[in-house]
Image (cartoon, rainbow, N blue to C red):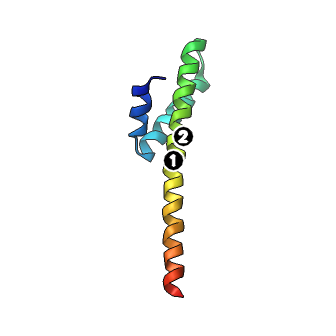
Amino acid sequence: MTESDLAEIASFGYERARDELVNVVKMLEQGGMDLDESLALWERGEALATRCEEHLAGARKRVEDALSRRETEAE
């Protein structure tokens, strides 16, 4: 996986990363690729999964912050 591939994935929104990850999984499940192709696709899938996790962690933090502010305002 090249630096430009990683930079491209880093720019993806959650939905785009998720959709592409679903496609990667489907392709890997179908098989028929040689080992190098499979490994490259798996690496891309890992990078996409990491990007999805980053988005979800950010969303979780925003919800926690909002709840914390709400609790503070209620006191």
CA neighbours of label 1 inside 10 A, class few (<14), some (14 to 19), many (20+): some
Q: Residue furthest bottom?
A: 75
Residue at figure coordinates x 50%, y 36% from the top left: 48
Residue beneath label 2, please? 50
Q: Position of residue 4 (x, y in %)?
A: 39, 27
Mark sitting on residue 29: none
CA neighbours of label 2 inside 10 A, class few (<14), some (14 to 19), many (20+): some
Residue at figure coordinates x 39%, y 33% from the top left: 8
The vertical placement of 31 against 66, above or below, is above
Q: Position of residue 2 (x, y in %)?
A: 45, 23
Residue type at tag 2 = Thr
Q: In the rendered view of the protein, which quadrant contains the C terminus?
A: bottom right
The secondary structure type at the circle numbered 2 is helix
Residue at figure coordinates x 46%, y 35% from the top left: 20
Tag 2–tag 1 contact (CB < 8 Å): yes
The secondary structure type at the circle numbered 1 is helix
The vertical placement of 63 against 46, above or below, is below
Residue beneath label 1, please? 54
Residue 43, picture quadrant = top right
The vertical placement of 25 against 73, above or below, is above
Q: Position of residue 22 (x, y in %)?
A: 52, 36
Residue 33 visible in image: no
Residue at figure coordinates x 53%, y 73% from the top left: 67
Residue type at tag 1 = Glu
The vertical placement of 48 against 31, above or below, is below
Q: Nearer the viewer, residue 62 or 13?
A: 62
